[in-house]
């Protein structure tokens, strides 16, 4: 995976070229014949402009791989990359695939968030008639903080911890296996994350003003104690990521040692007003399908879209905070929308492997009140 901040080191790269290098790295690391890949499933939210033309197909061709391998693009908002993994696994389980690549892509420098719905209303009059109170994700994060009685200091503390954990993991080399060095058009190689701020402190974050407390929002919610800032929200990022998924039989034929097996997956919908709480019913559902209790899970990744999201999830499940986003979350490592599910998957697997844990769970909140959840077992 390659990750950079908007306007940063990866911004000169066309999104297709960023993904092409990641696909090349994945194929090269595993020593597979690319012609044996059945399909390439790529999650992407901003399917417009340079990301509009089935970017997985173009990236595959740009990498020089066989034209016989197809691709498709998947969009489930922030969970698009995780949904790509789910579909890949389901395809293998159904016998439709023997070997498939699941990935995600988002160049937020070149296709800023919201570009694909600029000057439009994607919901339509029927949705607004049924849910006239709908708000933006930022205000939803504020309402979640209020519902779960989360203080500003708790939100900022999670943010400081996210950066500290990510910095510690990077210094210990625990992120190295997640990163494919990316070569820019000018020959510069990018091999480290740009979004981690190791010097972040509570004192610095306390100086930031609430990001979503506009005059209109304050009028609509006069009693709300505004707490969500740029510092306790996820950072935008440019990134592409990919994972190689195959049947046990094909792995044995190729002499490859699987790193993990997929135990269960689930999707869920929840209140579109609060929007970001779908991770709670999705987690309950995936644990039921996996026939596991939360106490049997060694590590959990909950996407840090806003600090209030993992804290609300933790309030529900009482999970050990030391094993939640153990190597830092999206506040420190960035939230490249369609690629975030792959990033969480890489972090979850790294946490399990570095401590010899067995079961891991990841879940993604998504616009519209949706969520994905997945349980894996380290092998």
Image (spheres, helix red, strand yellow):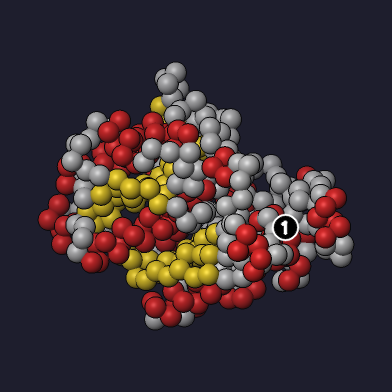
Q: Nearer the viewer, residue 339 or 2?
A: 339
Location of residue 173 with respect to 361 vertically, above or below: above
> Which residue does the image show at 30% across and 64% down from the upper left?
90
Residue 361 in percent (x, y) is at 45, 67
Q: Identify the residue position indicated by label 1 in the image.
A: 139
Location of residue 321 with respect to 181 vertically, above or below: below
Residue 114 in percent (x, y) is at 59, 44
Q: Is residue 13 visible?
A: yes
Count of labels in the image: 1
Examine the image and state in which quarter residue 235 appears. top right
Q: Can residue 259 be seen in this view?
A: no
Quick one: which residue is furthest to the top in this view?
A: 186
Quick one: which residue is furthest to the left in this view?
A: 253
> Which residue does the image show at 34% across and 60% down from the upper left?
87
Q: Residues within 10 Å of mark 1 (few under 14, many from 20)?
A: many
> Which residue does the image show at 23% across and 66% down from the upper left?
94
Residue 106 in percent (x, y) is at 48, 41
Location of residue 1 with respect to 245 vertically, above or below: above
Residue 306 in percent (x, y) is at 65, 56
């Amino acid at each position: 995976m390659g990750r950079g901040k908007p306007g940063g080191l990866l911004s000169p790269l066309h999104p297709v070229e960023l993904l092409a290098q990641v696909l090349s790295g994945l194929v090269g690391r595993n020593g597979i014949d690319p012609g044996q890949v059945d399909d390439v499933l790529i999650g992407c939210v901003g399917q417009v402009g340079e990301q509009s033309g089935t970017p997985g197909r173009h990236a595959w061709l740009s990498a020089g791989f066989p034209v016989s391998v197809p691709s498709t693009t998947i969009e489930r908002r922030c969970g698009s990359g995780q949904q790509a993994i789910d579909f890949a696994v389901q395809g293998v389980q159904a016998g439709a695939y023997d070997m498939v690549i699941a990935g995600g892509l988002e160049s937020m420098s070149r296709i800023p968030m919201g570009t694909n719905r600029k000057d439009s209303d994607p919901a339509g009059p029927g949705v607004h008639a049924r849910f006239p109170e709908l708000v933006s994700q930022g205000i939803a994060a504020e309402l979640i903080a209020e519902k779960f009685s989360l203080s500003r200091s708790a939100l900022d503390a999670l943010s400081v911890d996210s950066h500290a954990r990510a910095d510690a993991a990077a210094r210990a080399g625990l992120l190295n296996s997640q990163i494919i060095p990316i070569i820019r058009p000018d020959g510069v190689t990018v091999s480290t994350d740009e979004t981690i701020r190791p010097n972040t402190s509570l004192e610095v974050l306390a100086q930031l003003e609430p990001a979503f407390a506009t005059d209109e929002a304050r009028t609509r919610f006069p009693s709300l104690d505004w707490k969500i800032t740029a510092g306790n929200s996820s950072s935008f990022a440019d990134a592409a990521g990919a994972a190689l998924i195959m049947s046990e039989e094909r792995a044995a034929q190729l002499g490859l040692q699987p790193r993990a097996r997929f135990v269960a997956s689930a999707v869920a919908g929840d209140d579109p007003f609060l929007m970001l709480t779908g991770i709670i019913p999705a987690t309950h559902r995936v644990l039921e399908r996996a026939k596991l209790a939360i106490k049997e899970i060694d590590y959990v990744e909950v996407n840090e879209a806003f600090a209030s999201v993992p804290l609300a999830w933790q309030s529900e499940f009482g999970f050990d905070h030391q094993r939640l986003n153990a190597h830092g979350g999206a506040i420190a490592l960035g939230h490249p929308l369609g690629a975030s599910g792959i990033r969480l998957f890489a972090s979850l697997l790294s946490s399990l492997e570095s401590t010899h844990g067995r079961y891991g769970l990841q879940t993604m909140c998504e616009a519209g009140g949706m969520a994905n959840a997945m349980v894996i077992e380290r092998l």
